[in-house]
Image: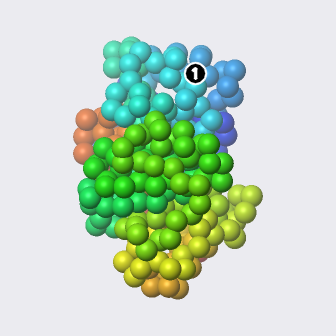
């Protein structure tokens, strides 16, 4: 029996998950099919209930449903309860378990792609939305020494810092970058097709040469922020590795097998090139 996994969101047509997850399933010889399940909010309860079927392993969850799915699940695992959002659902004998792999995926990308261990390091997060939330909790769990959060709406930054607790703290103004090991754009600024694709989320003047500049936007591969960082000779990390590693953790939740990260990464990059050309 072919079993199914899918992504729940609205819309979901742009998602790379069906491409790289299916590549991983096929590489591992698994009789699994990954589907895109566009789900308006009114249809969310029925969609989540359908995950209890024996032929469904689970699902990914994307915007705008990461919080709304929680009341429909039986149990939360990992960081999901503290973060207050779920991006991975696992069906275990008809019971639905919710996990959040966004933050752990970010930390895995830091470790494996940028070769940065968060413990004892100082981070600046620009933005206080869902992505920043998962990243902040994961960095705190990974024993970062300092997490400063800046957002255009100061109250949102303060609320996130309060939820995370030590070592997170909100700041009212963007601080000088010379005191950080890593600065992260957790907003959609610079995203292809977004409301401000040429924007740079924060100025890089004054950064010390070792500052790692991270942008969680993955299309384009080199955002205006990363391009500016490269021009200044700063190390960079784009958003695609975070996407791949959070997907790899979801794959492992569903299958119990090690995820073929290289296969997933190659499939995602090929798809981005197909959609946007070599400059994806």
Q: How many marks?
A: 1
State the residue at coordinates (51%, 50%).
Answer: 170
Which is more toward the observer, 279 or 231?
231
Q: State the image coordinates of residue 61 (x, y, percent, origin top left).
A: 52, 35
State the residue at coordinates (31%, 54%).
Answer: 144
Which quarter of the figure has residue 224?
bottom right
Which quarter of the figure has residue 174?
bottom right
**Vertical placement of 43 versus 239: above or below?**
above
**In what quadrant of the picture does the C terminus appear?**
bottom right
Q: State the image coordinates of residue 266 (x, y, percent, origin top left).
A: 41, 62
State the residue at coordinates (62%, 48%).
Answer: 154
Q: State the image coordinates of residue 194 (x, y, percent, origin top left).
A: 71, 58
Circle 1 crowding by C-alpha within 10 Å: few under 14, some 14–19, many from 20? some
Q: SS at mark 1?
A: helix
Task: State the residue lying farthest toward the right.
Answer: 195
Which is more toward the observer, 130 or 119?
119
State the residue at coordinates (28%, 66%).
Answer: 115
Q: Is residue 219 visible?
A: no
**Vertical placement of 15 versus 226: above or below?**
above
Q: Is residue 258 visible?
A: yes
Which residue in the protein does label 1 denote? Answer: 47
**In what quadrant of the picture does the N terminus appear?**
top left
């Amino acid at each position: 029996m072919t079993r199914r996994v899918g992504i729940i969101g609205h819309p979901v047509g742009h998602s790379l998950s069906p491409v790289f997850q299916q590549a991983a399933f096929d590489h591992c010889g698994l009789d699994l099919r990954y589907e895109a399940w566009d789900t308006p909010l009114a249809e969310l309860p029925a969609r989540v209930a359908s995950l209890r079927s024996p032929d469904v392993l689970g699902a990914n969850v994307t915007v705008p449903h990461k919080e709304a799915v929680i009341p429909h699940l039986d149990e939360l695992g990992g960081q999901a309860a503290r973060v207050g959002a779920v991006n991975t659902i696992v069906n275990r004998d008809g019971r639905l378990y919710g996990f959040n792999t966004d933050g752990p995926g970010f930390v895995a990308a830091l470790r494996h792609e940028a070769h940065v261990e968060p413990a004892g390091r100082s981070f600046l997060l620009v933005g206080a939305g869902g992505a920043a939330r998962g990243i902040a909790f994961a960095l705190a769990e990974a024993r970062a020494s300092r997490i400063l959060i800046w957002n255009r709406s100061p109250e949102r930054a303060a609320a996130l810092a309060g939820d995370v607790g030590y070592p997170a703290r909100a700041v009212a103004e963007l601080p000088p970058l010379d005191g950080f090991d890593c600065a992260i754009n957790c907003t959609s600024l610079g995203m292809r097709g977004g409301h401000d694709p040429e924007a740079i989320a924060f100025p890089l003047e004054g950064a010390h040469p070792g500052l790692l500049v991270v942008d969680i936007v993955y299309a384009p591969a080199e955002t205006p922020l990363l391009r500016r960082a490269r021009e200044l000779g700063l190390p960079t990390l784009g958003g695609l590795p975070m996407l791949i590693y959070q997907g790899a953790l979801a794959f492992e939740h569903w299958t119990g097998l090690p995820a073929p990260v290289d296969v997933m990464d190659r499939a995602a990059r090929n798809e981005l090139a197909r959609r946007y050309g070599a400059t994806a």
